[in-house]
Amino acid sequence: MAKPKKTPRPKAETPKGFRDYFGAEVTQRTEMLRKIAGVYHRYGFDALESSAVETVEALGKFLPDVDRPNEGVFAWQEADDDGKGDWMALRYDLTAPLARVYAQHRNDLPTPYRRFAMGPVWRNEKPGPGRYRQFYQCDADTVGTAAMAADAEICAMLSDTLEEVGIPRGDYLVRVNNRKVLNGVLEAMGVTDEGQAADVLRTIDKFDKVGEAGVRELLGKGRLDASGAYIDGVGLAEAQAEPVIAFLTSKGTDAAETLANLRAAVGESAVGAAGVDELGQIADLLAAGGYGPDRIVIDPSVVRGLGYYTGPVFEAELTFEILDEKGRKRQFGSVAGGGRYDGLVKRFTGQEVPAVGVSIGVDRLLAALREKGRVTGHDVGPVVVTVMDRDRMADYQAMVSELRQAGIRAEVYLGNPKNFGNQLKYADRRNSPVAVIEGGDEKAAGIVQVKDLILGAQIAENATLEEWKERPSQFEVARGDLVAKVREILAAHDLDEPEWD
């Protein structure tokens, strides 16, 4: 008789493109999102938590391939008797669900509707270093108004948000452009073919990397890149390229000069002139609110979401330098972006509904805060109440309860208390700042031992025997003074808010 085959054990590993987040990372993200939500709430935006799953039909316009809806997103077909069940998908952003929510509930929502949303999104794309299939986004949108005041407000709120979470003024810049101006430039060039227009816009997006000369080459016959490979150009005549060059070099010393240069770049184009007017309104509103060019600027080089945005576009760029994996200096780059998208809700209602919003890349912003030293690389653990006598567990639970009621994070050691050294090793692994010790003798005398684990580690690493004697890290205090002593130690190490520096 053949032996039954053993079922192989499952591999204990995360799926490709996904990762696990542990205590410190979750705490840091939660605290950052709390601060962001505070700014959004102050601006009058309401929280919305929509479903993580939408129908493919609702997401359809921006899927990479509607005929194969599980390409680009995580999708599946509902079971159905005739095999024609709906296709469902995990949301790939927070904006498409907003369009569905607004269309579905528009009769019950105020107009304009101002909402913010935070949560994970999923994209079925090839993962790479630092690129995951699940990541967090943090959005704020205003639906139902075409007023440029909404766009200006989003830019101001983005600026305030960056400063609130710890990016100081001077380390970031919110840059604003307008898709209508880009369309005006295309009109001035005489470019009407959609494919050629897309090639021109992609070339504009390379201005920061290749400069004016490189853009001229790419708009014409092409150019050799740094590796020596030849990149085919768009094939425009030199005269046709001039409006693009005028557009890309239109940034002046102030908003007024930039706007004047943009008017010249769009020529007789009505849509281009309308875009410049909108930028002028935004600039005036921001100036009135005290948001100067040290925070928000009109910048023609911003190109975003070519098939998505219909008006103003903006992005927040962090301007401080970091070292890349090869030790080279580079700017940190963009952490947020958005713009006006007046066609998204129309898919559901048949009527155009103006909307504008911004999305913050949560993981990138957290990485930036770590670079600035605004977030610690590790979490501070709880105070650990050790167990010297397992028959007196009630006494230890009473201690930890007092600490918790005083707002101090604390726990009782719940492992095998037989080896006291293992309890202190546990406290070290938990990154605990304090250990509380009460044996039989301490209980009889009405005292407890409070051990400053942070100071103890510092002394063990650096101090001489004489310094160790002068700076004790363990204190004997009356049982009734336990909470006060623990508070004193936490305050000495500036751990009143241990999760966030």
Image: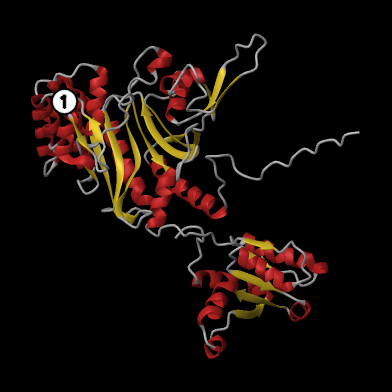
Residue drawn where x is 47% and y is 47% of the image: 34
Q: What residue lies at 52% left-to-right and 84% top-to-bottom?
A: 463
Give the side of residue 232 with respect to residue 91, left or right.
left
> In which quarter of the view is residue 284 placed?
top left
Closer-to-camera residue (218/62): 218
* 308 versus 468 height, above or below: above
Q: Nearer the viewer, residue 14 or 494?
A: 14
**Residue 221 horizontal/vertical position (percent):** 17, 28
Q: Count the marks.
A: 1
Where 281 sits versus 449, above or below? Answer: above
Residue 440 is situated, as x and y percent measured from the top left of the image, at 78, 77
- Asked where in the image residue 382 lies, by quadrant, the reply is bottom right
Nearer to the camera, 256 or 245: 245
- Report the quarter where the N terminus lies: top right
Q: Residues within 10 Å of mark 1 (few under 14, many from 20)?
A: many
Q: Residue at x 25, y 40 (%)?
A: 228
Check the image and name the residue furthest to the top. Answer: 82
Q: Amino acid at mark 1?
A: Val
Q: Is label 1 in a helix, a strand or a loop?
A: helix
The residue indicated by pointer 1 is 185
- Give left or right: position of 290 versus 497: left
Question: Residue 242's spot in the image, x, y percent?
Answer: 10, 29
**Quadrant location of the C terminus?**
bottom left
Q: Seen from this angle, which residue lies furthest bottom?
A: 466
Q: Is residue 442 visible?
A: yes
Location of residue 389 with respect to 43 vertically, above or below:
below
Say which quarter of the image contains residue 344.
top left
Q: Residue furthest right?
A: 1
